[in-house]
Image: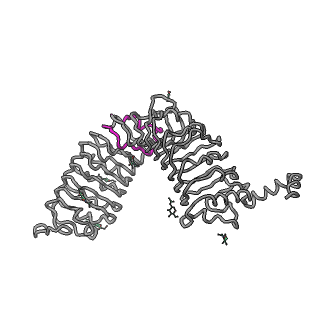
């Protein structure tokens, strides 16, 4: 060693050449990186019968090829992905010293416990840190500082952190994806405190014990890069001012205290590029007219509100449509099935829907789940035997009359059927599918007969 170092210093270009070789031939793990990783492995507690990455970290193998390890061209570890390795216990501060080029670190889906491992925030080169879905808990110290001045992705979701949103978060001006959902953070937080993150791309504060305060024309409303805003269960009383968020694609304002009409402007956010909208579990009474749903919307969840009046005709690309638990008091538009051609699931259960089930549903050929239960639907069951992918059909607790159409036995994917509590009559179709359903699928229809019901059909019936 004492000879090699000076010679290397003398022949700098030779040293660079050697490095160059490493770049072109293969990124070989540097020995200090290997020993840092091995001491990390030694210090972590993990279940080796479940581990697929750590368990294979082995002195005799080149460390850039180890599971979860990615090196840069100089042989420094830059990504460490230790998700789902059954790691438990805490992380000590000494373990990161050698890994000073680390950019992305994930400990997601493990069983880490104790408080936030502060040492992770001291890694100077860090760009992304994922600690989601662990058992971390407690208040996060106000004294924590983040060493990296480039951190842009922080995920602390699905832990049990308490107290107010940690202060260090507000000192990371570069943050673009911040995920703090499913913890026990509490207190009130003004949405405008996030207005200073000019690069904010995704914010998720859902399912804490937070009260999120919204201002008109505050600094939050001027963010230009926001793509995803998740504020479920944030005690919101007002819709955030997102009129100018021209890149917004995902909006979740479910489980809040929003009321009145859903304003028509909300369908224009994201310049018509909105794909996911969840306004469920609020107190909305209707949709302000006129409204135009964004063409690209593919998830629309309006369930558990107090929507009255016309049943909104969704955009054609919607694949998940939930209107259940509302108070429409109107009937399903005749053409409704024709706009559900690409829809996979549609529910309007328990929503005071009246009138007949439109025949056009036979054109909703992508449907897997159709739930029209607990309404005041009348008329007969439409001929929808052609819905080849339908797995679940719930028409229970309505006022449907007539027979169960024979052609429903053509629903070869059907694994759940409920037509209970209607006024149906006649013999239950005897297809093999239909034999598999029990009495519970048919009860409460006085006129129905034949297996699986005990009531036999008279001559007239069969
Ligand atoms: C976690 O790893 C186990 C195997 O060890 C695997 O079965 C499971 O699907 C993984 N879970 C996730 C979320 O990747
Ligand atoms: C390390 O890996 C080599 C080559 O795959 C293998 O032969 C050896 O048994 C491994 N050692 C340990 C301790 O797992
Ligand atoms: C939103 O955009 C409009 C027009 O581009 C602008 O006049 C208005 O000041 C912006 N509002 C906010 C809160 O940034
Ligand atoms: C909408 O939000 C509710 C409540 O947060 C949740 O249960 C539901 O799964 C969400 N809908 C979709 C389509 O993600
Ligand atoms: C189903 O769609 C076809 C065109 O694809 C249309 O001609 C027909 O009228 C539709 N059926 C109903 C009942 O609306
Ligand atoms: C059920 O499907 C078969 C074959 O796909 C078809 O021939 C038959 O007409 C269908 N039955 C009814 C009642 O629609
Ligand atoms: C069908 O709905 C009725 C009424 O809600 C219920 O009692 C019955 O158990 C349901 N049947 C099945 C198969 O779930």
Looking at the image, which residue is at 39% across and 43% down?
A: 254
Tell me where residue 208 appears, x and y as whole percent: 44, 43
Residues rendered magenta in the picture: 260-286
Q: For this rendering, which residue is in front, 179 or 311?
A: 179
Residue at x-position 36% and y-position 36%: 258
Residue 220 lies, with reference to residue 91, above or below; the image says above
State how the image is colored: one colour
Which of the 4 image quadrants contains residue 142?
top right
The vertical placement of 221 against 358, above or below, is above
Residue 281, given in percent of the width and then of the height, sits at 35, 43
Q: Quadrant of residue 152?
A: top right
Task: State left or right for residue 438 relative to residue 99.
Answer: left
The residue depicted at 39 percent of the width and 49 percent of the height is 318
Q: Is residue 266 magenta?
A: yes
Q: Quadrant of residue 437?
A: bottom left
Does residue 30 appear left or right of residue 190 in this picture? right
Question: How many circles with numbers are drawn on the protein?
Answer: 0
At which x and y percent is residue 442?
21, 62
- Magenta stretch holds residue 460: no
Tell me the quadrant of the picture where the N terminus can be found: bottom right
Give the percent coordinates (x, y) of residue 240: 44, 34
Depth check, front residue: 20 or 55: 55
Quadrant of the drawing holding the C terminus: bottom left
**349 with respect to 45 (left or right):** left
Q: Nearer the viewer, residue 34 or 293?
A: 34
């Amino acid at each position: 060693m004492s000879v090699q170092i000076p010679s290397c210093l003398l022949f700098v270009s030779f040293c660079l050449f050697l490095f160059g070789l490493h770049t072109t031939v293969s990124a070989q793990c540097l020995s200090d990186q290997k020993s840092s990783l091995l001491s990390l492995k030694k210090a972590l507690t993990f279940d080796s019968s479940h581990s697929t990455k750590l368990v294979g970290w082995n002195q005799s193998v080149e460390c850039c090829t180890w599971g979860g390890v990615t090196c840069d061209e100089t042989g420094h570890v830059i990504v460490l992905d230790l998700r789902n390795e059954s790691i438990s216990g805490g992380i000590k501060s000494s373990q990161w010293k050698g890994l000073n080029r680390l950019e992305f670190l994930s400990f997601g889906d493990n069983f880490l416990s104790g408080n936030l491992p502060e040492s992770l925030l001291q890694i100077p080169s860090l760009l992304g840190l994922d600690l989601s879905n662990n058992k971390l808990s407690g208040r996060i110290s106000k004294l924590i500082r983040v060493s990296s001045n480039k951190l842009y992705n922080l995920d602390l979701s699905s832990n049990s952190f308490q107290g107010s949103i940690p202060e260090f978060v507000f000192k990371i001006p570069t943050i673009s994806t911040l995920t703090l959902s499913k913890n026990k953070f509490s207190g009130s937080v003004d949405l405008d405190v996030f207005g200073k993150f000019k690069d904010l791309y995704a914010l998720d504060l859902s399912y804490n014990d937070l009260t999120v305060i919204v201002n008109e024309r505050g600094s939050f409303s001027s963010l230009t890069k926001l793509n995803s805003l998740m504020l479920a269960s944030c005690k919101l009383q007002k819709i955030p001012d997102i009129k100018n968020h021209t890149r917004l694609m995902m909006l979740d304002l479910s489980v809040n205290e929003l009321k009145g009409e859903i304003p028509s402007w909300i369908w224009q956010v994201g310049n018509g590029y909105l794909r996911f909208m969840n306004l469920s579990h609020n107190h909305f009474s209707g949709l302000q007219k006129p409204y135009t749903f964004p063409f690209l919307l593919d998830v629309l969840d309006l369930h558990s509100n107090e929507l009255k009046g016309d049943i909104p005709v969704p955009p054609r690309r919607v694949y998940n449509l939930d209107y259940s638990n509302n108070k429409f008091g109107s009937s399903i538009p005749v053409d409704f099935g024709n706009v559900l051609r690409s829809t996979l699931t549609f529910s309007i259960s328990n929503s005071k829907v009246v009138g007949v089930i439109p025949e056009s549903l036979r054109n909703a050929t992508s449907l897997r789940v159709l739930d029209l239960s607990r309404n005041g639907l009348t008329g007969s069951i439409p001929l929808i035997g052609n819905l080849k992918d339908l797995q679940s059909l719930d028409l229970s607790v309505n006022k449907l009359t007539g027979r169960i159409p024979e052609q429903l036995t053509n629903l070869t994917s059907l694994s759940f059927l409920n037509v209970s509590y209607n006024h149906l009559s006649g013999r239950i179709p005897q297809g093999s599918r239909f034999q598999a359903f029990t009495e519970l699928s048919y009860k409460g229809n006085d006129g129905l007969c034949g297996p699986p019901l005990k009531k036999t059909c008279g001559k007239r019936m069969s």
